Image (cartoon, rainbow, N blue to C red):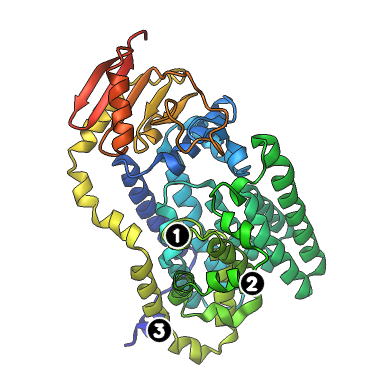
C-alpha cells in the first residue's frame, strides 16, 4: 500500500487537527523554554522585549534600558500591550515563549481551514498544514528568542480564512492586529490589498490598501520621530539600509545585490521546501516579494540566512500561493506530487534548520550542564526588587529584566548598542549590582569589569571561574 493510500485511510477531522496542534505546541514550547532555561537567549532581542512588556504590564513607562530608546522608538510594536496582559499575571520570560509557540502553532489549523475553504480534501489540507509546521522558516521562527511581530504570521493566515468565509469583521480584525505587530507589516499587506482589488474584491482591497498605507505613514513619520527624535534611523549610520540609501538610484546596485550568490541561495531556500509550487499562483505570492526584497536589500547576512524570524510576513503569502497552486492542479497530479512534496519539505527542513536542530540536538548536553547551576546561583543573589539597578552580560539579561533599569554590560560605563548613536546615555549611573561572565564579553569589556571591581566602589559577592557578581559598597 502506498504512503498516499495509507494517508487516505486516516480519518481527518477537527479532533485530529486539534491533537496535532497540541502536540506541536507542547514540543515547540518545551524547546523554546529549554533554550531560556539554559541561557541561550540574549539581551538582543529577548531581553529588550522582556523589559518592555514587563514595564507595560506594570505601568512603568516605555523607556528601554537594554536598547537605550523608548521601545516604540526602535520599532512600532503596538501589539506589545496585548502580550502585557498575560505577563501581568505570569511575569516570566517563559510566558512570552509559551505565547509565541501557541501563536505560531495556531497557524496549523489556519492553514488547514484555508486549504479546505479553497476546495482541497481533508487529507490534502492536513498534509499542507504539516508542511507548514515543517517549513524551515516556521520552525526557526519559533526558536529565535521572542519577537512580538511574529504574531503577524498567524493573524494573516486567519485573515485569509475569514475572507474566504466572508467573515468580514474577523478579516478586518486580523488585518488590524497584523498591522499592529510592526510598522513594515503594512507594506506586504498594502500589496495584498491591490491584489484583492484586481481580483474583483474592490471595496475590501481598497480599504486594505489605504488603511495599510496610512498606518505605515503614521508609524514612520509620526510615531518613530516622536519616540526617538529621529524617525526610521536604519537608512544611515551603518545600519541595515545604509548601503541602499546611498545607492537606491543606481541600477547596478540592484543587479549586484539581487544576483549575489547569497541572495539567490536565500530565495532558493525559501522555495525548495514547497517545490517552487507557489510560483504557479503568482498573484497570491506577489506580496511576499516585498519583505523578501527588503531582507535582500538590507545587505545583512542574518536577515537572509533563513535561520531567524525575518520571514514572518513571507510565510503567510507563500502558503496562500502554495494552496492556490495545488487547487489549480488536477487531483491525479496532486496525488503524484505527494511524495516529491514530502521529500522537498524534508530536504528544506534539514537544509535550513541547522539552528533549530542544533538546539534540539544539544538538549542532552544542556541538561547535564554544570554552568547553568552556577549562573542560577549567581542570579539568585541579586534582589528581585524592580527598583534595584543591574548591569549584566547579554546572556543573563532575560533573567533580570523585570526591573526599571537593566543594562547590558558594559553599559552604563561604556556605550555599546545604546540608542541610535549613543544619545541619552546614562553617564554617571552606577548600578547596584553587576553580574558578568567575562569569557563572553570580549577582552576590552573584561578589562573594564576588572577595573570596576577593583575600584573600591564594589565588593565581590560571588566568583566561580569566569562568572562574577559584585555589589556597590554603599548599597
Task: Measure the C-alpha gap from mark 3 to mark 1.
Answer: 30 Å
Query: In the rendered image, which quarter contains the C terminus?
Result: top left
Quadrant of the image occupied by residue 162: bottom right
Q: Which residue is mark 1?
A: 301
The residue lying at 47 percent from left, 36 percent from top is: 50
> Residue 9, image x and y in percent?
39, 80
**Which tag, 2 or 3, sits closer to the chain's start?**
2
Task: Measure the C-alpha gap from mark 2 to mark 1.
Answer: 22 Å
Of tags 2 and 3, the one toward the viewer is 2
Quadrant of the image occupied by residue 168: bottom right
**At numbered mark 2, what does the secondary structure look like: helix, strand or loop?**
helix
The residue lying at 44 percent from left, 26 percent from top is: 412
Disc 2, disc 3: CB below 8 Å?
A: no
Q: Which residue is mark 3?
A: 340
> Residue 10, image x and y in percent?
40, 75
The residue lying at 41 percent from left, 59 percent from top is: 307
| Residue 459 in view of the camera | yes
Between residues 315 and 233, which one lies in front from this camera angle?
A: 233
| Mark 2: few/some/many CA within 10 Å (<14, 14-19, 20+) | few
> Residue 264, image x and y in percent?
48, 74
Q: What label sits on residue 251 in the rendered view?
A: 2
Query: In the rendered image, which quarter contains the N terminus?
Result: bottom left
Amino acid at each position: 500500500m502506498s504512503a498516499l493510500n495509507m494517508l487516505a485511510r486516516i480519518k481527518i477531522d477537527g479532533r485530529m487537527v486539534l491533537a496535532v496542534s497540541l502536540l506541536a505546541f507542547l514540543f515547540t514550547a518545551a524547546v523554546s523554554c529549554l533554550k531560556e532555561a539554559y541561557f541561550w537567549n540574549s539581551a538582543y532581542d529577548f531581553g529588550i522585549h522582556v523589559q518592555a512588556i514587563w514595564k507595560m504590564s506594570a505601568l512603568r513607562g516605555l523607556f528601554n534600558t537594554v536598547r537605550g530608546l523608548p521601545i516604540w522608538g526602535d520599532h512600532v510594536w503596538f501589539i506589545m500591550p496585548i502580550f502585557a496582559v498575560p505577563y501581568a499575571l505570569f511575569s516570566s520570560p517563559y510566558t512570552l515563549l509559551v505565547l509565541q509557540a501557541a501563536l505560531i502553532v495556531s497557524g496549523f489549523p489556519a492553514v488547514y481551514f484555508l486549504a479546505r475553504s479553497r476546495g482541497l480534501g481533508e487529507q490534502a489540507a492536513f498534509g499542507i498544514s504539516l508542511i507548514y509546521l515543517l517549513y524551515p522558516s516556521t520552525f526557526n521562527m519559533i526558536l529565535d528568542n521572542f519577537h512580538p511581530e511574529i504574531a503577524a504570521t498567524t493573524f494573516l493566515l486567519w485573515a485569509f480564512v475569514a475572507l474566504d468565509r466572508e467573515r468580514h469583521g474577523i478579516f478586518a480584525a486580523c488585518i488590524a492586529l497584523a498591522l499592529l505587530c510592526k510598522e513594515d507589516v503594512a507594506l506586504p499587506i498594502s500589496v495584498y490589498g491591490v491584489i484583492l482589488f484586481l481580483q474583483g474584491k474592490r471595496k475590501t482591497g481598497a480599504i486594505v490598501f489605504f488603511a495599510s498605507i496610512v498606518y505605515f505613514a503614521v508609524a514612520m513619520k509620526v510615531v518613530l520621530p516622536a519616540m526617538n527624535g529621529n524617525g526610521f534611523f536604519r537608512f544611515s549610520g551603518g545600519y541595515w539600509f545604509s548601503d541602499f540609501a546611498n545607492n537606491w538610484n543606481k541600477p547596478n546596485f540592484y543587479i549586484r545585490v539581487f544576483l549575489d550568490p547569497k541572495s539567490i541561495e536565500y530565495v532558493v531556500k525559501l522555495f525548495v521546501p514547497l517545490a517552487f509550487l507557489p510560483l504557479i499562483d503568482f498573484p497570491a505570492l506577489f506580496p511576499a516579494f516585498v519583505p523578501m526584497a527588503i531582507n535582500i536589500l538590507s545587505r545583512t547576512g542574518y536577515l537572509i540566512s533563513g535561520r531567524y524570524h525575518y520571514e514572518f510576513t513571507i510565510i503567510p503569502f507563500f502558503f496562500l500561493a502554495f494552496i492556490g497552486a495545488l487547487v489549480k492542479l488536477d487531483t491525479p497530479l496532486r496525488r503524484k506530487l505527494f511524495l516529491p512534496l514530502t521529500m522537498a519539505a524534508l530536504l528544506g527542513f534539514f537544509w535550513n534548520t541547522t539552528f533549530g536542530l542544533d538546539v534540539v540536538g544539544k538538549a542532552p548536553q544542556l541538561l547535564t550542564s554544570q554552568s547553568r547551576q552556577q549562573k542560577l546561583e549567581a542570579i539568585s543573589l541579586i534582589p528581585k526588587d524592580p527598583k534595584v539597578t543591574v548591569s549584566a552580560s547579554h546572556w543573563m539579561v532575560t533573567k533580570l529584566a523585570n526591573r526599571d533599569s537593566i543594562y547590558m554590560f558594559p553599559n552604563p560605563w561604556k556605550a555599546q548598542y545604546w540608542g541610535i548613536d549613543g544619545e541619552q546615555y546614562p553617564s554617571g549611573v552606577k548600578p547596584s549590582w553587576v553580574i558578568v561572565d567575562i569569557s563572553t564579553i570580549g577582552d576590552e569589556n573584561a578589562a573594564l569589569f576588572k577595573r570596576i571591581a577593583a575600584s573600591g566602589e564594589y565588593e565581590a559577592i560571588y566568583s566561580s571561574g569566569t562568572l562574577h557578581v559584585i555589589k556597590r559598597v554603599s548599597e
